[in-house]
Image: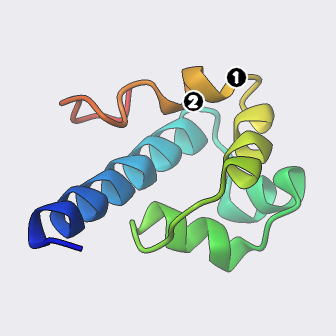
Amino acid sequence: MSNNANNNGSKLKKKLGQRLRFLRKSISLTQEELSFRSNLDRSYIASIEQGRRNVSLVNLHKIAVVFSMTLSEFLEGVNGNHNNGK
């Protein structure tokens, strides 16, 4: 994989993490509460928010459901230039 592809992947994971943290905090959920509602481990949620995790579509869907969003709604802004996670 080229350095450019690695950099793009890292940026995408970071933006996904920022989006998740923004949404979680916007409804005053802790990582533990999100973990319970999505049936995913709290450390897994933390690693997503830190931009260190490649996340499967199945797990992204589990998270989106917690926010009453479709997967596409959840991913809005992840590939764009939004700074606040929106």
Alpha-carbon neighbours of circle 2 within 10 Å: few (<14), some, or many (≥20)? many
Can you give x and y, in whole percent of width and height, for residue 5 in the image? 20, 62
The residue nearer to you, when weighing 69 against 57, is 57
Alpha-carbon neighbours of circle 1 within 10 Å: few (<14), some, or many (≥20)? few
Snapshot quadrant of residue 41: bottom right
Marker disc for residue 74: 2
Task: Report the amino acid beneath label 2.
Answer: Phe
Residue that mark 1 sits on? 69
Can you give x and y, in whole percent of width and height, for residue 64 in the image? 70, 35
Snapshot quadrant of residue 68: top right
Marker disc for residue 55: none
Q: Is residue 4 left or right of residue 43?
A: left
Q: Residue at x 59, y 60 (%)?
A: 55
Q: Secondary structure at mark 1?
A: loop
Decide: is 80 above or below 47: above
Task: Report the amino acid beneath label 1.
Answer: Met
Q: Residue at x 64, y 41 (%)?
A: 28
Snapshot quadrant of residue 43: bottom right
Q: Is residue 64 left or right of residue 15?
A: right
Seen as rendered, the residue at the extreme bottom is 43
* CB atoms of marks 1 and 2 within 8 Å: yes
- Whichever of callouts 1 and 2 sits on the residue coming sooner in the sequence is 1
Can you give x and y, in whole percent of width and height, for residue 17 in the image? 43, 55
Q: Residue at x 30, y 60 (%)?
A: 9
Quadrant occupied by the N terminus: bottom left
Quadrant occupied by the C terminus: top left
The image's colour scheme reads rainbow
Seen as rendered, the residue at the extreme front is 1
Spatial separation of the CA atoms under disc 1 and disc 2: 6 Å
Q: How many marks?
A: 2
